Image (cartoon, helix red, strand yellow):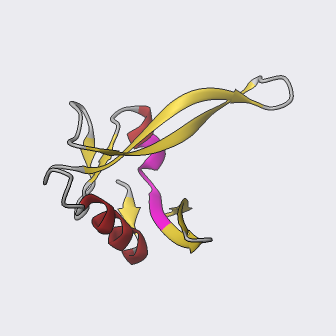
Amino acid sequence: MLALTPAALEVVDSIVSNEELPETAGIRITSEQTRSGLNGDSPQRDLRISVVAAPESGDELVDGAQIYVEGGETAQLLDDKVLDVELEDEEFRFSLLRQE
């Protein structure tokens, strides 16, 4: 299952603890099949991160964080990954690392 670095956990907590969001709010990670390469013949999955009011049916919950991962291919893709975050030009940039 997806793991988080302490920095990523802190950022996620700060995002979802916004007073305007319900207690069930979280970060939802989904993916979409796209094509890349010169001829568009190389399939890949693009990840999407959004703030949602609650998980959707079939979402997997990440232990210790309010992160909801879309079931199926997205969950499989992230199964051996670690979510990290860096501050860059006053914006947060999320990245994925391989779990060791």
Q: Is residue 20 above or below residue 3?
A: above
Return the x and y of residue 41 as percentages of the image width and height: 77, 23
Return the x and y of residue 45 as percentages of the image width and height: 58, 35
Return the x and y of residue 94 as percentages of the image width and height: 52, 60
Question: 81 or 24: nearer the eye?
Answer: 24
Q: Is residue 57 above or below residue 49?
A: above
Is 50 on the left-hand or right-hand side of 42? left
Q: Residue, x 57% and y 38% (percent of image)? A: 46
Q: Residue, x 48% and y 35% (percent of image)? A: 31
Which picture quadrant has residue 90? bottom right
Residue at the right extreme, as displayed: 38
Which picture quadrant has residue 20? bottom left
| Span shown in magenta | 76-84
| Residue 54 belongs to the span the image colors magenta | no
Q: Residue, x 34% and y 73% (percent of image)? A: 10
Return the x and y of residue 7 as percentages of the image width and height: 41, 75
Q: Is residue 20 above or below residue 34?
A: below
| Residue 78 belongs to the span the image colors magenta | yes
Residue at the front extreme, as displayed: 20
Count of numbered marks: 0
Q: Is residue 37 above or below residue 41?
A: below
